[in-house]
Amino acid sequence: MGKGRYSATPVISNRYYASWKLPVRSKGYVERDFTKGIATVQYVIKAGDRADHLAAKFWGDESYWWVLCLTNNISYPFSSGGFTVGRVLTVAVNVKDVLDQMFQ
């Protein structure tokens, strides 16, 4: 059986570690604004949009899909509350700016 598109866990620049295991809201969970103070754009989700496709569109690399989810507090991109048509996403102009905030 092959890996799903969201199952990769790459090491990025020997500093960042990506995982498909995104945080869920549980006791002690605190949302952080990973886009505070950095350049962003707004994007309205259209039918057929997927996190990996949007990461490739905005940052040139589909493996950053998890950054898009975390910056928009989407704990599971397949759920009905995640990528719904009409939802407005906040997308960093430069993904490295977000990563620097996440892993400082």
Image: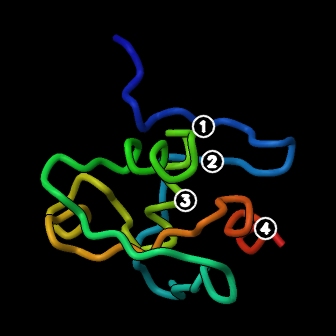
| Mark sitting on residue 67 | 3
Q: Tell me which label, 1 or 4, sits earlier in the chain.
A: 1
User: Does residue 89 sit above or below 53 in this rendering?
Assistant: below
| The C terminus lies in quadrant | bottom right
Q: Tell me which label, 4 or 3, sits earlier in the chain.
A: 3
Location of residue 57 in the rendering, given as x and y in whole percent from the top left corner: 45, 46
Q: Is residue 10 left or right of residue 64?
A: right
Q: Tell me which label, 4 or 2, sits earlier in the chain.
A: 2
Looking at the rendered image, the disc whose residue lies closer to the viewer, 4 or 2, is 4
Q: Secondary structure at mark 1?
A: loop
Please say if the residues under marks 2 and 3 sit with CB atoms less than 8 Å apart.
Answer: yes
Residue name at image x 69 percent, y 88 percent: 37
Location of residue 44 in the rendering, given as x and y in whole percent from the top left corner: 26, 70
Disc 2 from disc 3: Cα separation: 8 Å
| Mark sitting on residue 73 | none
Quarter location, residue 77? bottom left
Mark 1: which amino acid?
Thr
Q: Secondary structure at mark 2?
A: loop
User: Does residue 33 sit above or below 10 in this rendering?
Assistant: below
Quarter location, residue 39? bottom right
Please say if the residues under marks 4 and 3 sit with CB atoms less than 8 Å apart.
Answer: no
Residue name at image x 38 percent, y 42 percent: 53
Q: Tell me which label, 2 or 3, sits earlier in the chain.
A: 2
What residue would you read off at disc 1?
9
Quarter location, residue 13? top right
Mark 4: which amino acid?
Asp
